[in-house]
Image (tube, rainbow, N blue to C red):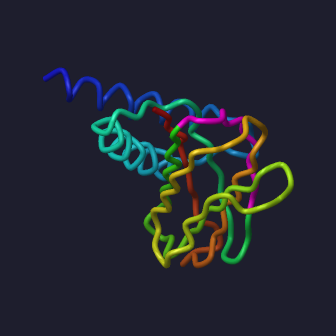
Amino acid sequence: MRSWINKSLAAFAALALLSGAPAAAQVPDPFARELAHQLAQAETMVGQSGYERVAGPFAGGLPSRADRRFQLTLRAGQDYELIGVCDGRCRDIDMRIFDEKEFVVGADTLADDIPIIHIHPAITGLYSVQVVMNQCAAPTCFFAFNVYAR
């Protein structure tokens, strides 16, 4: 019962954050609910490995072959998992993490719609997460990702 309550609260919190985000990042219903549900499932899975959410959800919409960047600070020596999700019309979405010098320090460029990146930064600093919408079966597909640490 407690697990169900925690999952429900996580999904509700993600939905609230997705729909309450700045105008550029707002995700309309029913996509916000779909993404919140997927993020809650991902959170349950990484939680079993000792990870907790430390940032997110970061969200938005992109047409095919477009990208968007998000900034975040990561601490040296910490294990991070970044997990992205995409609405049902999305066919392929990728994520890359760049350090302050624009070197790729992590990436998931598989042909799928759930990018997962593990990173253990050597340096504390500002990192840039690039989301690339490779294939979308609509004018715009919506995505979200969370950052987890342990």
| Count of residue discs | 0
Q: Quadrant of residue 47?
A: top left
| Residue reaching furthest to the right | 101
Residue 11 lies left or right of residue 117; in this view the side is: left
Point 41% across, 30% down: residue = 12
Q: Position of residue 34 (x, y in %)?
A: 41, 51
Point 50% across, 35% down: residue = 149
The magenta stretch spans residue 72: yes
Residue 56 lies left or right of residue 131; in this view the side is: left
76 or 65: nearer the viewer: 76
Residue 1 lies left or right of residue 102; in this view the side is: left
Q: Position of residue 78 (x, y in %)?
A: 55, 35
Residue 1 lies left or right of residue 60; in this view the side is: left
Image position of 18 with respect to 70: above or below:
above
Which quadrant holds the N terminus? top left
Q: Position of residue 95 (x, y in %)?
A: 61, 62
Point 48% across, 36% down: residue = 15
Image position of 17 with respect to 71: above or below:
above
Image position of 61 with respect to 23: above or below:
below
93 or 46: nearer the viewer: 46
Where does the magenta region start and end? 68-78
| Residue reaching furthest to the top | 2
Image position of 7 with respect to 102: above or below:
above
Q: Position of residue 11 (x, y in %)?
A: 38, 34
Q: Main secondary structure of the magenta part?
A: strand
Which quadrant holds the C terminus? top left
Point 65% across, 35% down: residue = 76
